[in-house]
């Protein structure tokens, strides 16, 4: 039986590719991978066909870091 983890990702969860904060958890039949937003986009084609679940919290980037907010000044 596979248990699906949906707990919110924390600052301790790191991208398996580059070590940045992970915002995407990809569950596979053999385990799980963590990705930053950049690497999740870069590798989404590869994992989407084999993933059993994808937990995408990239929308938190807007709330936490103001990404995409209006230019200052």
Image (cartoon, grey):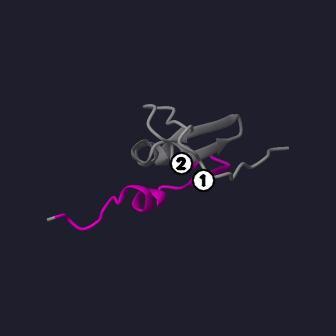
Dots 2 and 1: beta carbons under 8 Å? yes
Q: Is residue 14 visible?
A: yes
Residue 41 in the image: x percent, y percent?
A: 42, 49
What numbered label is drawn on residue 24? 2
Mark found first going from the N terminus, 2 or 1: 2
Crowding at dot 1, Cα within 10 Å, few <14 / some 14-19 / many 20+, comes out as some
Where is residue 47 drawn, in percent x and y? Answer: 55, 44
Say what secondary structure mark 2 lies in.
Answer: strand
Rendering coords of residue 32 (x, y %):
64, 38
Q: Verify whether residue 55 appears in magenta.
A: yes
Left or right of 61 in this view: 56: right
Residue at the far left in the pictured view = 73
Disc assigned to residue 69: none
Quadrant placement of the N terminus? top right
Which corner quadrant holds the C terminus?
bottom left
Q: Which residues are magenta?
A: 48-72
| Residue 64 position (above or below residue 33) | below
Question: Which of these two is toward me, 36 or 30?
Answer: 36
Q: Is residue 60 magenta?
A: yes
Residue 55: numbered disc = 1
The residue lying at 24 percent from left, 68 percent from top is 70
Q: Nearer the viewer, residue 44 or 22?
A: 22
Residue 16 in the image: state x and y as whole percent: 51, 32
Question: How far apart are the alpha carbons under marks 2 and 1?
Answer: 6 Å
In this view, the residue farthest toward the right is: 1
Residue 50, can we see it?
no
**Left or right side of 14 for 32:** right
Q: Nearer the viewer, residue 11 or 46?
A: 11
């Amino acid at each position: 039986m596979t248990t699906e983890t949906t707990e919110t990702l924390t600052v301790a969860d790191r991208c398996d590719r580059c070590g940045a904060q992970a915002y995407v958890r990809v569950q596979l039949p053999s385990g799980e991978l963590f990705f930053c937003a950049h690497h999740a986009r870069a590798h989404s084609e590869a994992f989407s066909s084999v993933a059993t679940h994808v937990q995408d919290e990239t929308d938190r980037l807007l709330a936490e870091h103001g990404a995409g907010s209006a230019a200052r000044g």
